[in-house]
Amino acid sequence: MAMMFAGPVAIMMMLLGGMSNDLLDAVPTEAYWKAHHGVESVTAESIRPFLAADSSEPGDIDALIGRLGHERFAEREDATRRLMAMGPAALPAIRRATESDELEIATRAREIKQRLMEVNQQKAIDRLMAIRTLGELKDRESLPALRNLTRGDDPMVADYARGAIDRIEGRKWVRPVTSRAELEQDLALVSGDMGIVGQFQMLPMRENGGVDAILKALPRELVGEPEALTNEIMRELIGVAYQTGNFRISSVTFGVSEEVGSNVGRAVFVVRGLYNPTAVTALLTESMRAVSVLGGQPHEPKVIHGQRFIAMKPEVAYLHMPAPDRLIFVAGANDRELKLQELAQLLRDQPRTPAFAPEMQALINRVDRNRPMWVAARLKEDYQKALGTEVLDSIIFSMRLDDGRLRLEAQARGENADEVAELAGNIRATLDEGIAELEGEAERVAALKPMADFVKSIRIEARDGIIEARGDMGENAGFVLPMFWMMSGSQARGVQGVEADAAPMPQPLPAE
């Protein structure tokens, strides 16, 4: 049970708390080399060989591919072994062979391609971990090779190499962040009839972040046995990395439509960072092929205005990967609600400024968009029902960094000042009851004290139809945010006298 909760919480702590925004950061280098390569003593000499890229020559690959369809089983098996031995260098030809008219060749080529891609990803992850390890070891002998890697065509490898060089030469390593101009461009892609709009920039990474820092922050009751949890997290994340490649998130821009329901509504997410589009595309393509093998109908990517959208769930969710540093996910109630034509036109035209409906634009204009996290929401009927109140018309939520401390601010507005003031009073009363219960829990579980301190810091004020709330997470955002997220549902319902397990799950709103 502890591991089931600790895994998701650990990832949230990494992303939200400045512990990391990079998948592999959660994996301790020594544990990785021991678990995946049996390296008991990690030294620069044992790690340097992993820096080299695969340099195998494809050889007479066409002849071997032809032998995949040989009438003799032994010949087919021998050709398969030889193609596997060629490694990732054989992938381009193998991919072409998957489209062969000969069933045996196409089938074997697909199997070989899948296995080679897994090997290729494993070697790519080994290389990134080797770069990071040599930086941690401050191995000056690897500097020439690392400098050469910064000039390569793989942006993830180049960035890792720059980070390792900085560590070796004693400079502070600072990862690239999303620029203000890029954030505005991303915001333009979620323009239109949105009711909720927001942006999150990952906080600056802390030194010595990752899983070790996470385990120190999490309560013992949640962690259980630290070594077992470390291995569990590492196994899960490496499994993901071996399929998709490493990925990093620098910022997320999102928009959700004004109306939501079973037959209406959409959401658009624009993610900045670094990832491997080839690996992700291959993974999705294989998933679609598996659907067809099981009797389903595979869906070809949609190409609109020159923009390629890959179906994650046909007519409902699509992925667009324009570059290794940007990924766009769009989901909707149906094909019409997705509005892929509009999104494709925005991608083609590349507007630099957003264009929302006047009311939404006015709300966003009240937000300080230089803050690392902010959300603006216009509360029409669907959202009011979801919140359980018709009093509020809009909410603005933001976070700001102040001398290393993360401070939260929220402002909600409604037309009826008396009803807004009454709602503020109810919120205060709920917080007061929650604080008493949380402080009791914090006495039993010391690691919950940062969350108790945060809830105690929240101040609620109401005036002229406006509720303002402020809270101080201090330097504990990486722990407070995910724990607050995980516990808030049951904690808040418990305050209201409702058992957490008995609380009804929110249901989709009916179509109009």
Image (tube, helix red, strand yellow):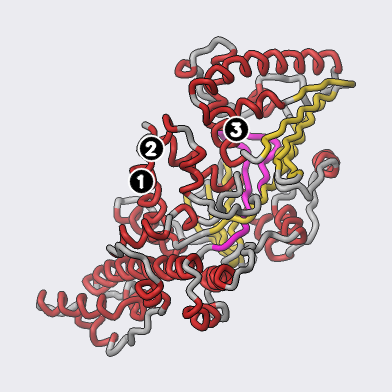
Residue 27, image quadrant? bottom left
Look at the image and tell me in which quarter the N terminus lies.
Answer: top left
User: Circle 1 — which element?
Assistant: helix
Q: Which corner quadrant of the image does residue 241 belong to?
A: bottom left
Residue 114 image point, x, y percent? 32, 66
Q: Position of residue 453 (x, y in %)?
A: 65, 27
**Numbered badge on residue 261:** 3
* In this view, the mark in front (2 or 3): 2
**Range covered by the magenta-colored residues:** 253-274
Is 259 magenta? The answer is yes
Drawn side of residue 146 relative to residue 197, left or right? left
Q: Residue at x 29, y 67 (%)?
A: 115
What type is the residue that disc 1 sits on? Glu
Dot 2 amino acid type: Met
Upstream in the sequence, badge 3 or badge 1? 1
Distance (Cα) linking label 2 and label 3 = 34 Å
- Mark 2, other Cα within 10 Å: few <14 / some 14–19 / many ≥20: some
Q: In the depicted view, which residue is nearer to us: 381 or 446?
A: 446
In the image, 364 versus 334, the foreground residue is 364
Q: Which mark sits nearer the N-terminus, 2 or 3?
A: 2
Secondary structure beneath dot 3 equals loop
Q: Which residue is mark 2?
A: 3
